[in-house]
Amino acid sequence: PVTPAPVTHIAVVNNDDAEPLWLIEVSDEALTVRTTDFLAESAENDYELWMVPANGEAPISLGVLPETGQWATNVPDILRSPDISALAVSKEPPGGSPNGAPTEVLYISPLTAV
């Protein structure tokens, strides 16, 4: 059996009531996002995940988040940087941000080393 790479960082994206919506794990190989039962699906909008650089530069999109189940992808090189301030989730039109920038930031979560 293949042993997955150990998780190096985690983030929990909570709503305003401190209920977890997405659980995010980063390893040397993968970025994995799991939804929780607290997340309400939206047919009108998508949610997009952003990396917020600590140097104040513009957020960088990591992709549209799932509204059910799990999503995994190869870990983007930008998540290997030690200069990450936080992860953010924005509400976007279907398909994600139309201009490469967050439209309406809903949630911000620290990315914590484990």
Image (cartoon, helix red, strand yellow):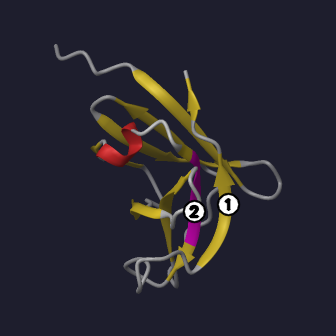
- Count how many numbered circles sit on residues in the image: 2
Element type at marker 1?
A: strand
Q: Name the residue under label 1.
A: 107
Q: What stretch is highlighted in magenta?
A: 85-90
Q: Position of residue 90 (x, y in %)?
A: 57, 70
Q: Mark 2 points at which residue?
A: 89
Q: Are marks 1 and 2 in contact (CB under 8 Å)?
A: yes
Badge 1 crowding class, 10 Å Cα cut-off, few under 14, some 14 to 19, many 20 or more, is: some
**What is the quadrant of residue 80 in the picture?**
top left
Is residue 24 something that shows in the picture?
A: yes
Residue positioned 53% across, 45% down in the render? 84
Secondary structure mostly taken by the magenta-highlighted segment of the chain: strand
User: Does the magenta run of residues contain 89?
Assistant: yes
Q: Which residue lies furthest to the front in this view?
A: 55
Is residue 75 depicted above or below 6 in this figure?
Answer: below
The C terminus sits in image quarter: top right
User: Does the magenta run of residues contain 102?
Assistant: no
Q: Position of residue 36 (x, y in %)?
A: 58, 47
Amino acid carrying mark 2 in the image: Val
